[in-house]
Image (spheres, rainbow, N blue to C red):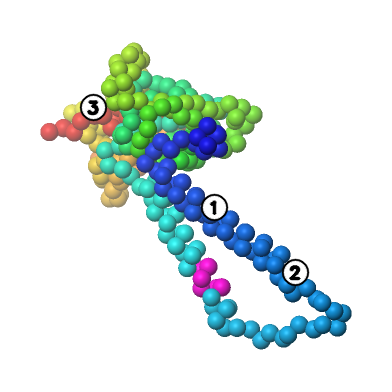
Amino acid sequence: MKDLPLFPDSASNLSIHVDGLMGALTLFSVFFAVLIFSLVVIFAVKYKRKSEDERPKEIHGSMVLELAWSVGPFLVLLAIFVWATRVFFMAYAPQPGAMEIFVTGKQWMWKLQHPEGPREINELHVPVGKPLKFTMISEDVIHSFFVPAWRIKKDVLPGRYNNMWVRPTKTGKFHLFCAEYCGTQHSGMIGWIHVMEPTEYEKWLQGGGDLSMTGRGEKLFQQYGCSGCHLEDNKGRGPSLKGIFGTTVKLQGGQTVKVDEAYLRESVLNPQAKIVSGYGRIMPTFQGQIGEDSLLQIIAYIKSLEKPE
Ligand code: CUA
């Protein structure tokens, strides 16, 4: 059975729960399909009209029966709903201390990176046992990030960050697919996830050679001139970005906003949308000049800036 590719590896904290639910639903459906089909055949034989003038007995309904087949299935479906919702929350509720993975989908490849790791295309190396948080965005059309062995799948949308959490529990090499038809090469938008022992992962990181994600972000931060205004001592034309991530800032007009990935992205692409209190409307837009993966690198760099004492 194990060699039959019908059943993908069970390689994450979610897979056992997804499999349990899936198995139960399948058994449930098989049970009722067999029951109903058998009864159809049995009743067809048993109640076959024996003679031309035979008339069936009249039936005037049964309250007990009506209630049983209404309330019974209702309770069963409610139980399935509660069960499925618990599994859903496991996959989409934040896990503390997760390692961040940034994903950019593009016709037709996956660009993957974590803050301290080198840039990868259609490949991702992660250590086993550590929770992962995916932040995903598309540069063009809708894609879908699907790792069957982890039992996770989520749409990757243009213009918006989507998140997903998982904890790999098994080392090995696992398929990565795009699960949303996205054009002619959709079937080629595939890759591999390498789950490694932590020591091997460290070794792999050392051998990377490539600039880390925050390193690239820092370079871009200078290249695009961000560092000219967002001075660290808060004396620049823009607010200092040191330690800003995760805090709440006050805007012109008195509202506040929590600094998260979506807010940072918006502030680069559409700076006029939310101006921090005390600053002018002087920042130019970078819409169309910065790609989604560069944006993610800049955000990773801003996140890495430590809070001032
Ligand atoms: Cu990307 Cu299908």
Mark 2 residue's CB less than 8 Å from ligand 1: no
Left or right, residue 175 beside residue 168? right
Prevalent SS, magenta region: helix
User: Residue beneath label 2, please?
Assistant: 45
Q: Residue 209 at what x, y percent from top left? A: 34, 13
Give whichever of discs 1 and 3 has the lower sequence position. 1
- Mark 3, Cα crowd under 10 Å, few <14 / some 14-19 / many 20+, is some
Residue at position x 66%, y 86% in the image: 60
Earlier residue among tags 3 and 2 = 2
**Magenta residues, as a range?**
69-74
- Where in the figure is residue 217, as x and y percent of width and height? 33, 24
Of badges 2 and 1, nearer the viewer stands 2
Disc number for residue 231: 3
Q: Which mark, by number, is residue 26?
A: 1
Q: Cβ–Cβ below 8 Å for labels 2 and 1?
A: no
Q: CA distance from mark 2 to mark 1?
A: 29 Å
Label 3, secondary structure: give it.
Answer: loop
Q: Name the amino acid, label 3.
A: Leu
Residue 293 or residue 235, whichever sits in front: 293
Of pointers 2 and 1, the one earlier in the residue sequence: 1
